[in-house]
Amino acid sequence: MKNNSIPHAFIQRMDAMGVSTSDIAKSLDVSPRTVRYWQSGKCAPHLNPPQSAALCVLLQCSIFDLAGYFEEERQAA
């Protein structure tokens, strides 16, 4: 999946909340490279429930908002 509309909603939300790639990687126990793939649109996250909850806390959003941040990438694929 490739997204040419950077920054997309995920990056915008990270910026708005002052959350870094490293913050997300540490909180979700994934590599920073994985988060950068999400940011680039190369892939969407495949999170388990605790990771989803942690990301929602970091981004101060609902699970529905979180899904929406990646919806445009899924539709573009």
Image (cartoon, rainbow, N blue to C red):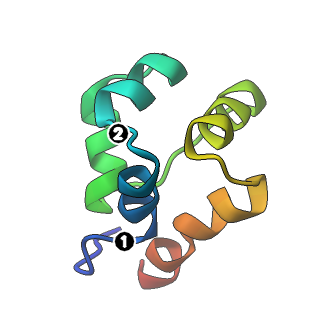
Question: Residue 33: x and y, percent?
Answer: 24, 33
Q: Amino acid at mark 1?
A: His
State the residue at coordinates (36%, 71%): 8
Of circles 2 and 1, the one toward us is 1
Question: Residue 16: x and y, percent?
Answer: 42, 57
* Disc nearer the start of the sequence (2/1): 1
Question: Residue 14: x and y, percent?
Answer: 41, 51
- Tell me: residue 34, above or below residue 2: above
From the viewer's perspective, is 69 left or right of 66? left
Neighbor class of circle 2 (other Cα within 10 Å; few <14, some 14-19, many 20+) is many
Neighbor class of circle 1 (other Cα within 10 Å; few <14, some 14-19, many 20+) is some
Secondary structure category for the residue under label 1: loop
Relative depth, front residue between 9 and 47:
9
Q: Amino acid at mark 2?
A: Val
Instruction: Check disc 1 and report the residue beneath it.
Output: 8
- Tell me: residue 60, above or below residue 41: above
Number of labels in the image equals 2
- Tell me: residue 3, above or below residue 53: below
State the residue at coordinates (47%, 54%): 44
From the viewer's perspective, is 67 left or right of 19? right
Q: Which mark is residue 68?
A: none
Relative depth, front residue between 46 and 10:
10
Secondary structure category for the residue under label 2: helix
State the residue at coordinates (57%, 73%): 71
From the viewer's perspective, is 20 left or right of 55? left
- Tell me: residue 70, above or below residue 77: above
Q: Which image quarter is the N terminus in? A: bottom left
Instruction: Check disc 2 and report the residue beneath it.
Output: 35
From the viewer's perspective, is 7 left or right of 77? left
